[in-house]
Image (spheres, rainbow, N blue to C red):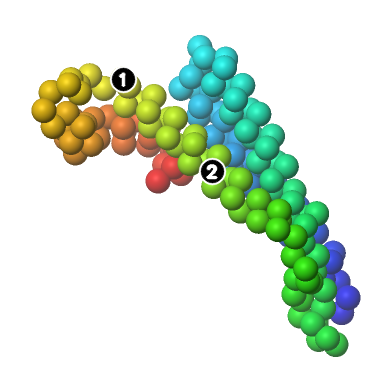
């Protein structure tokens, strides 16, 4: 009894490590795809630092306490509004990395978008196999 805050800090630290290392995989993917573009790579490294800061709000903004005399824990009131950043930051970052990766892979597909139904042709026919093959290349299936 009385170990809720320690357990919360340990679990929050593990979450910080897991979310930041997963986001770092996205940096390596973006660096590979945009190897000649230092601007895009720098932006994603900066966004990764923001993910680290966002994930640390779980440690700073939430506190745990025991529920009465039991050995069970709960988050103490009030929960800080900014503490939801630990969920939102990795989601937005990985979604942005996915969009940039898919756009880079799709840019390598040769299709005439000015033709009638060009976008439908892009989404459903010619390029989908190129985009999927690129996303799953080198075991990078974690985007799906």
Q: Which residue is painted at 85% across and 64% down in the image? A: 6
Which x, y percent locates residue 126?
18, 30
Q: Secondary structure at mark 1?
A: loop
Q: Residue furthest right?
A: 2
Viewer-closest of 92 and 19 = 92
Q: Which residue is painted at 88% across and 75% down in the image? A: 2
| Quarter holding residue 3 | bottom right
Which x, y percent locates residue 94?
52, 41
Give the mark, 2 or 1, whose residue is nearer the N terminus.
Answer: 2
Viewer-closest of 103 and 7 = 103
**Mark 2 surroundings: few (<14), some (14-19) or many (≥20) residues within 10 A:** few
Q: CA distance from mark 2 to mark 1?
A: 25 Å
Eyeballing the image, is 57 above or below 99?
A: below
Q: Which residue is mark 1?
A: 108
Disc number lying in front (2 or 1): 2
Q: State the quadrant of the N terminus.
A: bottom right
Viewer-closest of 117 and 129 = 117
Q: Does residue 90 appear in the picture of this structure?
A: yes
Image position of 121 (left or right of 5): left
Q: Which residue is mark 2?
A: 92
């Amino acid at each position: 009894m009385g170990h809720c805050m320690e357990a919360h800090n340990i679990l929050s630290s593990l979450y910080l490590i897991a979310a930041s290392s997963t986001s770092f995989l996205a940096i390596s993917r973006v660096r590979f795809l945009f190897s000649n573009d230092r601007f895009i790579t720098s932006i994603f490294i900066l966004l990764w630092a923001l993910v680290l800061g966002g994930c640390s709000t779980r440690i700073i903004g939430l506190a745990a306490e025991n529920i009465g005399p039991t050995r069970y824990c709960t988050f103490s009131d009030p929960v800080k509004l900014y503490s939801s950043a630990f969920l939102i930051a990795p989601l937005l970052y990985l979604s942005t990395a996915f969009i940039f990766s898919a756009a880079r892979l799709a840019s390598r597909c040769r299709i005439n978008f000015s033709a009638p139904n060009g976008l439908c042709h892009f989404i459903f026919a010619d390029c989908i196999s190129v985009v999927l093959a690129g996303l799953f290349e080198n075991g990078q299936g974690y985007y799906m």
